[in-house]
Amino acid sequence: MSSKRDLFSKYAVKVDLVKPKRTVFIIRPENVRPLFKDLIEQHGYESFYISTIVGTDLPGEGKIRLDYYVVLLPEEETIVVRTYLDRNNPVIDTLVDIVPGVFNGECETHDLLGIFFKGNPYLKRGFFVSLDIAEKGIYPLRKDSGV
Amino acid sequence: MTVTKVVEIPLVTTEVPIGPQHPALHEPLLLKVYADGEEVIKVEVNTGYNHRGVEKLCEKNTFYRDIFIAGRVCGICNTVHANCYVRALEYLLDIKPNNRARYLRVLAMELERIHSHMIINAIMAEIVGFETLFMQIMLDRERVMKAKEILTGNRVLGDYMMIGGVRRDIDEVKRARIRDLLVKLKPRIEFYKKVFEEDETIIKRLVEVGLLKPVDVTSHSLVGPVARGSGVRIDSRASDKYDAYDEIPFNVITRTEGDSWARMMVRWDETLEALNMCLYILEKLPADGNPVPDEKRLPRVIPQGESYARVEAQRGELTYYVMSDGKSTYPYRVKIRTPSFNNIINSAFMYVGLSLADVPVALTSLDPCISCMERVIVIDLEKNTKYKLTLKELAGGRV
């Protein structure tokens, strides 16, 4: 367990907490993909799963926050990999080719918040949001979307 | 004789739509199955027949109204949805319910697990053509529906959870009635488990159908009985020990076969575990005060912060992320991730190589919950060939 946490600590620029006692490792967006690559190489696919991806619009800061909730196995400890993207150009490398379990999360976050996961061929507007809203370029979970 | 002509027979791929309205499916979902003869070579999971938009709705309603919205994400697993959301708020408020409330919450959730597992096993029996078994299981399921009604006041939508406790207490008469119903139910569950273990038809249809290896489970983020049926021990009741799960004894059921049969057997064993837990709760129910808090004294504004609650729903790990800005009575962000969102959408790879007739069996073994899944519209495509119709267009026959 400690070695897995060490790996997250290695990339973290700051450590925070989400209640109840979920450790948050804040890392740079360009390090998210290398982190998961290292995790797979060093500990294997059976050592974790990505439970969910949570995107949150923070217009006051001009950022979109992206959280990957990761469950470490077999201890089943939930930790959070957090990164911040520029709200005007929210781009991050995809994980779908190395962790197929993020497929639904990346597609959802793209369509609802407008985050572009570079390298994910499945992203498409109108996947989740009804076409009349998608065609207007509205991302419904952005705070200024007016939805 | 010399060969003058070569006739090439092209590989013909047949597209077989299963759903969204189909006798083998009980909820609206479209599986676009591409088959070479009888063998499935590709499956696309197309959904969008139940789309609502609950997360946005939660942002537009108060923290307290959202308890009822959360309970309506899904009918069958409404109690766990409400529990998970309520606990996320309790983490922010630093409120802990008393012991009696924590035990009653587990009782409600385990009763829900029993009837949910029974219904999906009944549906599986129907899918494989064993309709008598379907009717028998559904008949016995009425006992647990009655028990849930006695506890929460409703057969299905309980609205039982509230911040700091539950909405109703039970007295000795109700305890005795629920216990009586469960005691009568137990031998029936044992009998159905035996049927699933021994019946030739069920064995032939389920064994080695829809195989999932442990590495497939974790890499595709599959959860719940689907994961445990492949030997991956994921159970947030055991790891997070929320409510009274740290005090009530139970076993985490796993199997190693990884097929549809293993997933159904995990559910039967979990039904028996849940039943024993309910009987334990009814016997040892603490009496440390009123489990129903005074709603008027609860704070309307939730302190600034973030919380992330997990619950082991019937179909697997269900999570709620709640963020409060500490200024208003509305949540800043609510993110719901249901087990079916992972289990159904990320599992299209599982069908490849099956025969067409096995597709409904494999899908049912995942216990799909479309209303849970379709808070958003999701498509699993290798090539982008998807569009969405409005209801008006659909009604007009444009498909």
Image (tube, coloured by chain):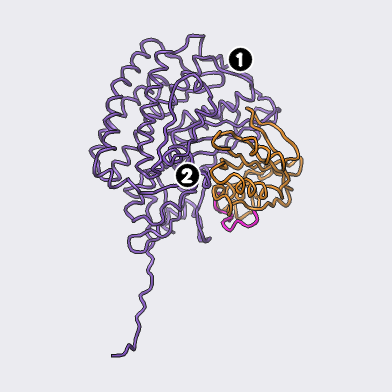
Chain colours: A orange, B purple
Q: Which residues are magenta?
A: A117-129
Residue A125 shown in magenta: yes
- Picture coordinates of residue B141 (x, y %)? 32, 29
SS class of the residue under badge 2? helix
The rendered magenta stretch, by its main secondary structure, is classed as loop
Query: Which residue is pictured at 35% across the width and 46% down the height?
Result: B25
- The chain that hosts pointer 1 is B
Q: Which mark is residue B214?
A: 2
Residue at mark 1: B297
Residue A31 x, y percent position in the rendering: 71, 48
The three-letter amino acid code for the residue at tag 2 is Pro
Distance between the alpha carbons at the discs numbered 1 and 2: 48 Å
Viewer-nearest residue: A65 or B183: B183
Q: Which quadrant: the C terminus of chain B? A: bottom left
Q: Quadrant of the N terminus of chain B?
A: bottom left
Disc 1, SS: helix
